[in-house]
Amino acid sequence: MIWLTWRQFRAQALAALGAIAALALLFALTGAHLGHLYDSSGLSGCSGAEACSTAKSTFFTDLKANSLYPVLYFAGVVLLYLAPAVIGIFWGAPLVAREVEAGTFRLAWSQSVTRSRWLVVKLGLLGLGAVATAGLLSLTVTWWAGPIDRAAALPGGGQSLGEALPNHFMPLIFGARDLVPIGCAVFAFALGVTAGVLARRLLPAMAVTLLVLAAVQVALPMAMRAHYLAPERTTTALTVSPNTPGVNLRIDGGNTQVNKPVDIPGAWVTSVRTVDAAGRPWNGPAPQICLSQSSTPEQCLGAINQLHLSQVVDYQPADRYWTLQGIETALYLVGAAALGGFCAWRVRSLRLN
Amino acid sequence: MTAVIEAHGLGKQYRGRWALADCTLSIPAGYVVGLVGPNGAGKSTLLNLVTGLLRPTVGSVEVLGGRPGASPTQLARVGFVAQDAPIYAALSVDDHLRLGARTNPGWDAPYAQRRIAKLGLDPKSRAGRLSGGQRAQLALTLAVAKRPELLVLDEPAASLDPLARREFLDDLADAVGERAMSVVLSSHLVGDLSRVCDYLVVLSAARVQAAGEIEELVADHRAVTGVPEADLEDLVLAHLSRGRNEQEAAA
């Protein structure tokens, strides 16, 4: 049975191996220089927000100077989101659906191997293949992006938006680092097999796999991940004054924004909001005096400070990165196990025509 | 002696329609059994129930005293060539023999090699390139080389031209002659059956119309109809038209 699985899967396995080797080579050739840029920018020894902030800016400018790095950075992310989809569609969906379409399950299931064992061996071996493929790809990309991820986690934000280094705890990047792609690939594989068992035809099974997987890949970071652990919360008073920079004030008709940049190194900030003295969300209107032509800026700032506004920030601190990686990977694996169990039960009573 | 197939009130329903109903059968060991009936009479359903690929909706079926497909041992005792002789198009003839060797404890490798050589099949050629007749032969080789006690063939010759058909059936007769196994073979062509079978089950309109040794059935038929030259074909036609009349009466 192991031989048969290997024989049927050989072409896909070799194709995957070839793709991994080519990608690993591409990333390996450029990765060394990325590490060199990190060292030469002074990031490795920096301490304190100010020194690190300067070093980060240097590093960022160096990165942007060669358009290859931004392209590879985002290509790595796209790759790790696509790989599970490819595994689900081309390894998972055909596993049962193609056998049913071609009628070959009648050949396979009339050898001296029960169909439960047939399925378990196939799920196990191809599942391991999914782990190896996603694992190697994730390892390559995570290693390559290591200098960027480390730099982003250092103190010293303060850069204007669009100039900040992307943090690997950010929703989009988090799913393309370390363990999560492995869990996702195993889940996608099990999802493909399940779609094949239910649809019993290859093309619909592939389409369903793609749609459901995309929905899960969007739903997990958007709706679930922030709730794995209760977020930490900091509240800081927003006192505006011409002498202390850092707090932004923006009056735009009835809408008024008072806030200050958040700098929590390496954290995933899930929510930033301005509240009034009673803790209610506040976004205006601005005090009347600010809109009057005759008043001075000082009078306006004084009136705003009278509101006793503060900024509430919810975030997952940097040291929870691995915990959240573990939780999300476990969720994917539990989902995959449930789908695998369903397939095993379903295949025992698969209808034939 | 245990019956090869023992069915009691066996029935299978698909989407509200009975593909096989109220089937009670006891087929003794050692025969080459012909299962005959028009298309859609339930032949494939019965054979898939016997091989354990389908589960009955009602009733029970025992094959060689065990539940079909329940265990590796039970699977090893039954060889099956499904309708249209499915094979893996991307795998070579050799790969198919290795598949058989790796998944069947009783695999008779010398027999399989000999048979492939005798058929003149190139072990290296992809099974998808074989003709319909060669496919059927490859599937038959796989099913016989696992050394089953019961060989089940579902319309094995249906897609073959008359010459390939005759060769296939002669080959089957040879293979059966070489080893002690019972065979159940379905067809909608009586000519196929009279060539190799010595036991007959007539299936029509999802029901068993007749079952027994061919010689006895023909003798009975001659006695009942009073036509001394009535042959197997007349007998089958008589049962099939009876099945159709019953169906029309019921509808």
Image (tube, rainbow, N blue to C red):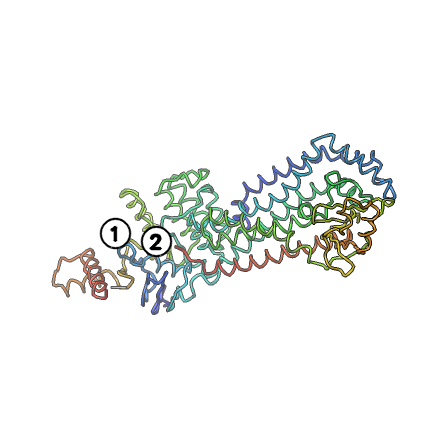
Q: Residues within 10 Å of mark 1 (few under 14, many from 20)?
A: some
Residue B61: percent from left, percent from top = 38, 66
Q: What residue type is labelled 1?
A: Leu
Residue matched to label 2:
B154
Q: Which of B222 and B237 is in front in this view?
A: B237
Residue A37 lies in quadrant: top right
Residue A306's disc number: none
Against B11, is B141 above or below? above
Q: Look at the numbered discs 1 and 2 and tell me whether their residues touch, using CB distance below 8 Å.
A: no
Residue B124: percent from left, percent from top = 46, 38
Q: Residue at x 67, y 46 (%)?
A: A172
Q: Which amino acid does label 2 sit on?
A: Asp
For the residue labelled by badge 2, is the local secondary structure a helix, a strand or a loop?
Answer: strand
In this rendering, do the residues under marks 1 and 2 share a single chain? yes
Residue matched to label 1:
B189
Q: Nearer the viewer, residue B189 or B173?
A: B189
Against A13, is A194 above or below? below
Tag 2, which chain?
Answer: B
Please give left or right for residue A115 compared with residue A218 in the image.
left
Badge 1 or badge 2: first in the primary sequence: 2
Quadrant holding the C terminus of chain B? bottom left
Please give left or right for residue A67 compared with residue A352 in the image.
right
